[in-house]
Amino acid sequence: MKEVAVALALAIVAFAAPASAVERELGTGVDLGGAMLVQSGKSSPDIGPSAGVHATYGLSDAFNLMLEGGWSLLAPTPPRGANLPRTLPAWAANADVGVVYVLDVLQWVPYAGLLVGGYDFSGGTIAGSKLYVGAAIALGLDFRVRPRWTVGVAVRQHMVTDTTAYPSFTQAFVRLEYVWGW
C-alpha cells in the first residue's frame, strides 16, 4: 500500500502542470457559500447563505494583495421572544483588504493570510446599522483548472471589535476566479 501511495505521488508530481502564480498577476472572482454568526444571548448560531466578490494582485510569487466584499443573510425574520437582545442582525456585510501567503504546489494553490476591514450588521432587532472595524483570518485552497481559470474553497474567520455581542463570524465559500496579466 505504501508503494502505491509513493508511486501515485510521483506520478502527480511528474505529470501535473505548474500553478505558476507570479508577481503582477491579477484575478477577480465570485464566492458562494454560507455564513455562521455566534451571538451572545442566543442559544444557537444563525446560519444562512453568503455571497461575495474578490480581487487579487500578485505582489510577488509568494504574496498576494486581496480585496474582498461579502454579504450574508443570517436571520430573515427575528425569532419571537420577550427578551431578545437588541443585537440580532438579519444580515451582515463586510469589505476587507489584506495580504495572503500563496504556496504554489503544482495545480493546487493553498493560501493563508490576514485581512482587515469594515463590517455592517443590520436588520432583525437592530435599529439602523451597527458598523465595526475588524479582521479576518483567510484560509483557502485553489485549483488551477486552466491557465486563466481557478476554482477553490475558502474559509474566513472574522473578528469584529464588539466581541461581547459577536464572538464569532465565519464564512465558507466555493470560489471561481479569472486570472490574467504578468
Image (cartoon, rainbow, N blue to C red):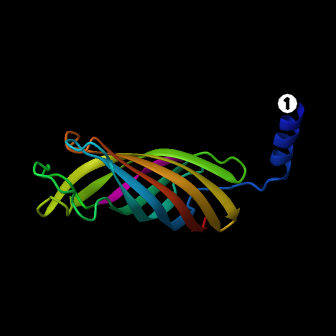
Point 85% across, 30% down: residue: 2
- State the residue position of label 1: 2
Left or right: residue 66 versus residue 164 is: right
When asked about the image quadrant of residue 91, the answer is: bottom left
- In the picture, the quarter occupied by the N terminus is top right
Residue 119 picture location, percent across and down: 26, 56
Q: Is residue 100 magenta?
A: yes
Point 63% across, 50% down: residue: 109
Residue 97 picture location, percent across and down: 38, 55
Left or right: residue 75 versus residue 148 is: left
- In the picture, the quarter occupied by the C terminus is bottom right
Point 14% across, 49% down: residue: 85
Point 69% across, 63% down: residue: 145
Please state the total of marks drawn on the protein image.
Answer: 1
Q: Disc 1 marks which amino acid? A: Lys
Residue nearest the viewer, comparing 142 with 26: 142
Q: Is residue 99 magenta?
A: yes
